[in-house]
């Protein structure tokens, strides 16, 4: 909830500054970014600019869908943060669409064809972060499955611990055990 609120509040404050200040006084930042004021009735790249209601309802459905994930699944710190960024950014843009009928954009770069806002940035960072978390979990899962397979076929030696915390409780090898049972 903290990350969602943080993303939403930062987005709304910067959009207010863009509306009240940068609209009349565009600003160059680090010779790379330009802070100005622009409105966007569509989504990325101006898509769906004539379908305001569809964009609002679809965005709200996505926000609700993403918001219920923590009710059913315990999330790690990173997953919670990135999910909060996505929801907070989407909520910031949908609030603009409901209030004004458009989204306030204000960040542009000289050699980049689009203009965006911090909500878009939070959504992008959250999406990339979730993707990286999923890749990292898959790699950890592959490593744990590999250890499980090695344990099942006897490649993990007696007393050797694994990331799965499996230990071979038999101190004798299979050959010694078979010899004793004869």
Image (tube, rainbow, N blue to C red):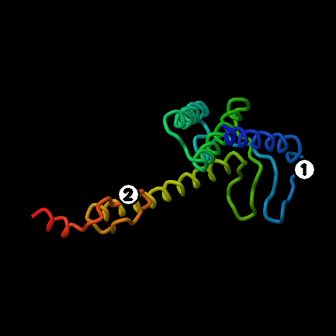
Q: In the rendered image, which quarter is residue 63 located in?
A: top right
Circle 1 — which element? Answer: loop
Of residues 49 and 150, which is closer to you in this image?
Answer: 150
Does residue 18 lie above or below 28 as drawn? above
Of residues 180 and 19, which is closer to you in this image?
Answer: 180
Q: Alpha-carbon distance for marks 1 and 2? A: 64 Å
Of residues 159 and 15, which is closer to you in this image?
Answer: 159
Residue at 49% x, 34% y: name it. Answer: 72
Determine if residue 10 is in view: yes
**Label 1–label 2 contact, CB within 8 A:** no
Measured as percent of width and height from the top left, residue 82 is found at 61, 48
Name the image quarter holding the N terminus.
top right
Q: Residues within 10 Å of mark 2 (few under 14, many from 20)?
A: some
Does residue 141 lie above or below 156 as drawn? above
Measured as percent of width and height from the top left, residue 174 is found at 21, 66
Q: Describe residue 16's horizontal placement relative to residue 6 as left or right.
A: right
Residue at 57% x, 51% y: name it. Answer: 127
Residue at 34% x, 59% y: name it. Answer: 148
Measured as percent of width and height from the top left, residue 123 is found at 63, 47
Of residues 19 and 161, which is closer to you in this image?
Answer: 161
Q: Which mark is residue 25?
A: 1
Determine if residue 45 is in view: no
Q: Which residue carries the number 2 mark?
A: 166
């Amino acid at each position: 909830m903290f990350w969602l609120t943080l993303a939403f509040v930062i987005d709304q404050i910067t959009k207010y500054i863009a509306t009240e200040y940068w609209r009349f006084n565009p600003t160059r930042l680090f010779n790379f970014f330009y802070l100005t004021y622009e409105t966007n009735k569509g989504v990325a790249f101006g898509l769906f600019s004539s379908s305001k209601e569809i964009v609002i309802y679809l965005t709200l459905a996505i926000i609700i869908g993403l918001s219920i994930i923590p009710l059913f699944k315990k999330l790690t710190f990173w997953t919670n943060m990135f999910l909060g960024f996505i929801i907070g950014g989407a909520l910031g843009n949908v609030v603009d669409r409901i209030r004004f009928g458009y989204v306030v954009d204000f960040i542009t770069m000289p050699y980049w064809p689009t203009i965006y806002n911090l909500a878009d940035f939070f959504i992008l960072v959250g999406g990339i972060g979730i993707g990286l978390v999923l890749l990292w979990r898959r790699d950890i899962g592959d490593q744990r499955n590999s250890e499980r397979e090695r344990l099942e076929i006897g490649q993990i030696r007696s007393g050797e611990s694994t990331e799965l915390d499996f230990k071979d409780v038999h101190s004798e090898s299979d050959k010694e055990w078979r010899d004793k049972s004869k």
